[in-house]
Amino acid sequence: MRFLAIVAFLLLAPLAAAPVHAVQPDEIFADSGLEQRAREIFRGVRCLVCQNQSIDDSDAALAQDLRTLIRERLVAGESDEQIHRFLVARYGEFVLLDPPFRPGTWLLWASPVLALLAGIAIAWAALRRRRSPVEPAALSDDERARLAALAASDEEGQ
């Protein structure tokens, strides 16, 4: 019985992780080709309220407004590129989940590699410091004389 429960869990668990789309049934186009284009655009546009979701996945009212706006522009015959340009002109490049690769976004694109290199450099420095034994500094003549005097006074005290 326990085995069956485990198997059922393993078969049903991926369903819980399946993406849930926030598009309402009354928003969907009757034309499947146009609907596919709309959904593809939705997946590339950031929800300005949620900020880490596409408008395809967001339940926010602003995301629904953006979906409606994009659908209206598709019906008007605009291309995907024209719609993207309109959204960027209105909301800035932040609205795109996949920003373009240009000089203004180089740091954004390079940051994962820079963070990885910084982590490797820190780990390398820590390992190097741990492996190399610290050599004691040589005593000066004054320090040797003082040490001898301390040792002599310690021996007299015993």
Image (tube, rainbow, N blue to C red):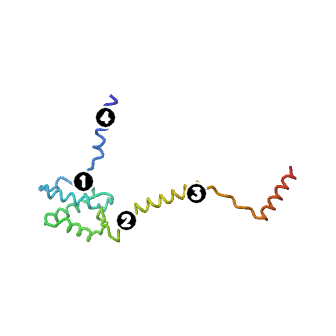
**What's the residue at 31%, 37% (across, down)?**
9
The CA span between labels 2 and 4 is 43 Å
Is residue 135 placed above or below 11 in the rendered structure?
below
| x, y percent for residue 75 | 13, 63
- Given residues 148 and 39, the one toward you in this image is 148
The CA span between labels 1 and 3 is 53 Å
**What's the residue at 16%, 67% (across, down)?**
78
Is residue 85 placed above or below 13 in the rendered structure?
below
Q: What residue is pinned by disc 1?
A: 22
The CA span between labels 3 and 4 is 50 Å
- Given residues 128 and 18, the one toward you in this image is 128
| x, y percent for residue 61 | 26, 59
| x, y percent for residue 82 | 20, 68
Q: Quadrant of residue 64?
A: bottom left
Q: Which mark is residue 7?
A: 4
Relative side of 141 to 71, left or right: right
Disc 4 residue type (three-letter): Val
Mark 3 or mark 4: which comes first in sequence? 4
Q: Residues within 10 Å of mark 3 (few under 14, many from 20)?
A: few
**Label 3: element kind:** helix
| x, y percent for residue 116 | 44, 59
Q: What residue is pinned by disc 2?
A: 108
**Label 4: element kind:** helix
Disc 3 residue type (three-letter): Arg
Q: What residue is pinned by disc 3?
A: 129
**Label 2: element kind:** helix
**What's the residue at 30%, 46% (across, down)?**
17
Q: Residues within 10 Å of mark 2 (few under 14, many from 20)?
A: few
**Label 1: element kind:** loop
